Image (cartoon, helix red, strand yellow):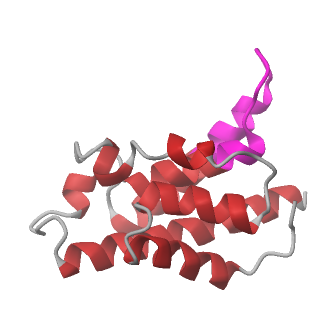
Amino acid sequence: MNTQIDFERIHNLAEEYYRSGDFYCSEAIVKTIKDEFQLPMSDAIIAAASGFPVGMGGSGCTCGAVAGGIIALGLFFGRTQPKDEKVNHTMELANELHNEFKKSHKSLCCRVLTKDMKLGSPKHMEQCISFTGEVAEKVARMIVRELDK
């Protein structure tokens, strides 16, 4: 695993994956974190993030970028064994990400965040691209902070 992380690169790479149309928000974040930290796991984890864009499969609910960020946190701190108490720490980190995004943007609801925007319009795309880079960088910073403890 790589621990020499360039946060600006993570921010820009996640944004570019979305901007280029290669991946949507949640997928871009998971791919960026997986690749930049050089996690030894299958790309199937990227596929697991494919249902979250546009507020959970297009429903307009929870922002896909935040959902992707929470998936990425789980890659590092989530549990794989029954009753493993580390789930509590992972939930705390997810809550931190949730609260910081909500504080910055007033909502996590995709339909609220994109109100009065046409899906796929330049304004919509730039906002969601920005959210993708922002969340990818925040998650990377949280991971490094937690691994340094």
Place of residue 131 in the rendered image (x, y in percent of width and height, measured from the top left): 42, 70
60 to 124, vertically: above or below = above
Residue, x 69% and y 66% (percent of image)?
A: 140
Query: Which sits in the foreground, 31 or 56?
Result: 31
Quarter of the image for residue 136 reads bottom right
Position above or below: 47 against 115: above
Question: Is 98 included in the stretch rendered in magenta?
Answer: no
Q: Is residue 83 left or right of residue 18?
A: right
In-front residue for pair 119/73: 119
Residue at 28% x, 74% y is 125
- In terms of secondary structure, what is the magenta stretch mainly? helix
Q: Quadrant of the C terminus?
A: bottom right
Residue 3 relative to residue 92: left or right: right
Q: Which picture quadrant has residue 57?
A: top left
Q: Give left or right: position of 132 versus 21.
A: right
Q: Residue at x 64, y 84 (%)?
A: 8
Residue bounds of the magenta highlight:
73-94
Indicate the position of residue 32 as horizontal and vertical percent values. 62, 65
Most foreground residue, 102 or 114: 114
Nearer to me, 86 or 58? 58
Q: Is residue 19 left or right of residue 87?
A: left
